[in-house]
Image: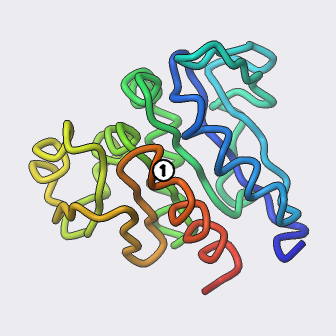
């Protein structure tokens, strides 16, 4: 219960990668943190690529970075939708400026690209968006998990164990 009193927000939209959403959420909850799902509308259910639903506890516009300790962005096709919301991009920039943990896996890097926070950073992602990450100014590494300060990134579902551990460690403060 090392994360008791911490709040993590996980961003939602349709067609998230089910494992990339639920695995880190469960790990963070196991450590005692509260995880809230945020989507375009509070109360709306979103369905993962393999049919597992998640319901938004809050709308993107309700989020306040000062009340959030960490941010999770799942992969799948959802990141291409999530990055179209100005409040999400503003939130990512606020979390980055405050050096709060931001976890992203697979295609979730698209959200960080659109928030324009990757210049000079080290990251990984699914190889399919490597060019996008590099064009945004990041150094892309083909490793299971890359930690660059408070940014924690991973490639795909087989990398979930070290990714979730690194995110939990970042929330603990080291």
Residue at 64% across, 60% down: 70
The C terminus lies in which quarter of the figure?
bottom right
Indicate the quadrant where residue 147 lies: bottom left
Residue at 45% across, 49% down: 158
Residue at 43% across, 78% down: 149
Q: Residue farthest to the front?
A: 158
Residue 165: x, y in percent?
61, 69
**140 to the left or right of 55:** left
Q: How many marks?
A: 1
Nearer to me, 118 or 63: 118
Q: Residue farthest to the bottom?
A: 174
Indicate the quadrant where residue 156 lies: top left
Query: Badge 1 local density, few (<14 within 10 Å), some, or many (20+)?
Result: many
Rendered view: 159 above or below 19: below
Nearer to me, 150 or 42: 150
Residue 25: x, y in percent?
71, 47
**119 to the left or right of 96:** left
Indicate the quadrant where residue 129 lies: top left
The residue carrying mark 1 is 92
The N terminus lies in which quarter of the figure?
bottom right
**11 to the left or right of 62:** left
Residue at 89% across, 67% down: 5
Rendered view: 49 above or below 136: above
Question: Regarding mark 1 in the picture, which secondary structure is present there?
Answer: helix
Q: How is the image coloured?
A: rainbow
Residue 172: x, y in percent?
70, 79
Rendered view: 115 above or below 28: above
């Amino acid at each position: 219960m090392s994360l008791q009193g911490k709040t993590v927000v996980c961003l939602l939209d349709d067609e998230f990668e089910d494992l990339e959403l639920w695995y880190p959420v469960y790990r963070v909850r196991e450590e005692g943190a509260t995880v809230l799902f945020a989507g375009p509308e509070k109360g709306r259910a979103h369905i993962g690529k393999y049919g597992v639903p998640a319901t938004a506890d809050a709308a993107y516009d309700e989020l306040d970075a000062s009340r959030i300790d960490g941010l999770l962005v799942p992969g799948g096709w959802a990141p291409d939708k999530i990055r179209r919301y100005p409040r999400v991009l503003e939130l990512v920039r606020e979390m980055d400026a405050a050096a709060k943990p931001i976890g992203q896996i697979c295609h979730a890097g698209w959200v960080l690209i659109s928030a324009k926070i990757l210049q000079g950073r080290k990251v990984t992602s699914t190889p399919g968006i490597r060019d996008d990450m590099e064009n945004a100014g990041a150094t892309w590494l083909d490793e299971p998990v890359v930690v660059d300060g408070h940014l924690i990134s991973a490639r795909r579902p087989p990398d979930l164990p070290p990714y979730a551990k690194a995110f939990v460690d970042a929330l603990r403060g080291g």
